[in-house]
Amino acid sequence: MPDLAWNPHLAICLDFTSKSYHLARDHLVNETIDHNAAECQLELLWTVNNDLERQEWDQQLEEQQAATEKEILAREEQEQLQQEQERECKLALQEDKKKYCHKHAPIPQDAMIPTEPIIIPVPIATHKLCKGDYCKLYFFTNKGLKDAELTP
């Protein structure tokens, strides 16, 4: 990640003619190179170095932008996948509601709870029904249910 505090594109070439760079110029001065040529060489070295730093900076910015784009694409893909899953869940719930409509029937809020006990037929009749045997219809008529209620 590039250091955003220092941008090499904004750098200004140093003044190599000043006294602070006199020692650096002295190291470059010899019989063929004078102080002006040394100054030009220092500027050339600074320019080459700055160009390399600019290329590095640009490459890091491109990598950072590519990584950001990848993150955005991954996030969008994740959101699309999540929306697709939600849509599939809704469709599955609708299918389930169609298939098992009695299971998803709305419960009325004003429904009265019965206060009287439920009358159950005689145990003989329920036992015969569980076994799958023949059972007389009499046990399920009003008279038969009243008889079942009276018997302990």
Image (cartoon, rainbow, N blue to C red):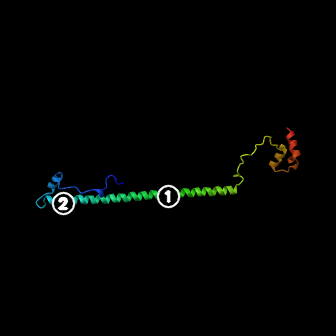
Q: Quadrant of residue 81?
A: bottom right
Q: Is residue 145 left or right of residue 52?
A: right
Is residue 81 visible in the rendered image? The answer is yes
Q: Position of residue 109 (x, y in %)?
A: 71, 46
Q: Amino acid at mark 2?
A: Cys
User: Element type at marker 2?
Assistant: helix
Residue position for label 1 = 76
Checking the image for residue 40, the label placed there is 2
Q: Amino acid at mark 1?
A: Glu
The residue lying at 43 percent from left, 59 percent from top is 69
The residue lying at 32 percent from left, 58 percent from top is 56
Is residue 136 visible in the rendered image? The answer is no
Q: Is residue 83 left or right of residue 46?
A: right
Q: Position of residue 111 (x, y in %)?
A: 74, 46
Q: Quadrant of residue 10?
A: bottom left
Quadrant occupied by the C terminus: top right
Mark 1 or mark 2, which is nearer the start of the sequence?
A: 2
The residue lying at 15 percent from left, 57 percent from top is 28
The residue lying at 24 percent from left, 60 percent from top is 47
Q: Are marks 2 and 1 in contact (CB under 8 Å)?
A: no
Crowd class of label 1 (few under 14; some 14 to 19; many from 20; radius 10 Å): few
Q: Nearer the viewer, residue 152 or 83?
A: 83
User: Element type at marker 1?
Assistant: helix
Q: Quadrant of residue 50?
A: bottom left
| Identity of the residue furthest to the bottom in this view | 32
Q: Position of residue 119 (x, y in %)?
A: 82, 43
Q: Nearer the viewer, residue 40 or 29?
A: 40
Q: Position of residue 34 (x, y in %)?
A: 12, 59
Q: CA distance from mark 2 to mark 1?
A: 53 Å
Q: Is residue 43 left or right of residue 103?
A: left
Quadrant occupied by the N terminus: bottom left
